[in-house]
Amino acid sequence: MHVTSKKLSIRNYRLLPLVIGVGLALASCSQKTTSHTADTSVATATTETVEADTASEFEVPVEYYTLDNGLKVILSPDKTAPIVTVAAYYNIGFRIEPKDRTGFAHLFEHMMFQGSDNLGKMEFIQLVQKNGGVLNGSTRFDFTNYFEIVPAHKLETMLWAEADRMKGLNITQENLTNQQGVVKNEVKVNVLNQPYGGFPWLDMPQYANKNWYNAHNFYGDLEDLDAASLEDVQSFFKTYYATNNAALVVVGDFDPAQAKEWVQQYFGDIPSAPLPEKANLTEPRQEKEQRFTKDDKLANKPAIAFAYHMPERNTPEYYAMGLLDQILLQGDDSRLHQALVQDKGYTGSVSGGINYLGNMFNYNGPMLWMGDLVHDKEVSADSIINVLDQEIAKLQQNGITQEQLDLALVKMRSSLYDQVSQMYGFGKADLLATFALFDDNPSRINELEEEFKKVTPEVMQQTIKEYLRPTNRTILVVNPQAQI
């Protein structure tokens, strides 16, 4: 397990460090840094370029069906390379883990690699690696996922292996105790014992949100991790890792008819389970700006993060915020980079975006649009917030022209296509799985670009007024305590 890099695809991708396994033949399994916006040359494209680009739109093939036991299955053939990605997504993430068991969803993700009915401890990982593949697993706000990327002729093997642990995980006290230690050490290494640990991806939701489900320590308090019992783990598996709470995706070079036979053969007899009532995740409308300071004994420079509550997912304002993110934060041409880095010289870089544990599409509840930066001690937090307010005010007062909107669309389109093509089909599988889980519509992957195109300058103005108001904002400042 190790910390992954900060930036990936559509926005800053602060993936909680839950990497399992090491890639061999195909690639490293750790998430890699890639550009999360279009090049500056693309960002300065003309409206004519935007219109020309629309002619090159592509459709992701989607075959979607549900087994009798409730398992959602998505098949997306792609003959580009002789490889396949198999991904199992479970509709359980940080938000709805049991109270007084913070970090439990993450802990359980570790347990899924401790063996199953026919594969002993570490044998799942070895099976993938010895067949020339890579694998990974992670826990996010609203799902836990597992995926393997292997040579195409090993598809059946991977389907069998995923089904084996879905139907019968090896849950023992020895495995639980071992993984409790692993996770606690991970918390110490990645959060407690490094500068800016948990800032702001872990910290900010706890300050900005009011609902416990959205505001607790997702990584887990050490005493809560210790308190997890074998009965807790067994109950969690039976409840949330059932077929009717999951989606299975196959992307790559395969025959759909053959894949459907294997899916039915290996997953069809796994029983479904009663699911608990969905947790209430709603957040109250924020009416007053919040400001907090966090002392950091290991940091030697101050840092600041700002967060605004997002519009509800899939609304016109939601898509408008995606475009405002491109205008304000994404890329060297963004307003905040130009103002804070190029003009003022307050910092060397500004990070940010929608959903620090993924992208703006793969979550299903309240979310924050955030930005963060480390700066010199001579620069006050208020100076940085003043620049932020000025740039937002310019957009509000001057309006957003259709030309500016078109340029934001170019950047968004480039980022979206980066996401779809990411990591040998995993990016495509990720969107297909989450759209199946959250919307019962994986074909939504082919509708995103049109939804962004529907956003008008008027909708952009309405979104700025309601969602980028200072009273919808939380500020978190890191106070450095390290001796230089």
Image (spheres, helix red, strand yellow):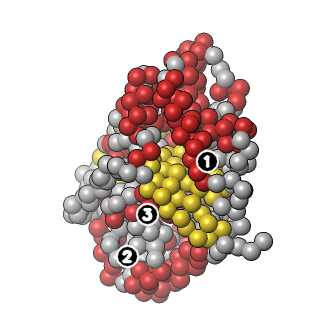
Q: Look at mark 3 in the image and give the residue it sits on.
A: 206
Judged by depth in the image, the label closer to the viewer, 2 or 3, is 3
Work out which residue is located at the far right of the displayed protein and give it: 484
**Residue 101 disc label:** 2
Mark 1–mark 2 contact, CB under 8 Å?
A: no
Secondary structure found at label 2: loop
Label number found at residue 384: 1
Spatial CA span between label 1 and label 3:
22 Å
As drawn, the residue found furthest toward the top would be: 48
Residue type pointed to by label 3: Gln
Mark 2: amino acid: Arg
Quadrant of image for the N terminus: bottom right
- Using the image as rendered, state which of residue 214 and residue 98 is in the foreground: 214
Residue at 45% from the left image edge and 40% from the top image edge: 468
Q: Position of residue 295 (x, y in %)?
A: 58, 70
| Count of numbered marks | 3
Q: Which numbered disc, 1 or 2, marks the residue that appears first in the sequence?
A: 2
For the C terminus, the image quarter is: bottom right
| Residue drawn at point x = 53 percent, y = 40 percent | 389
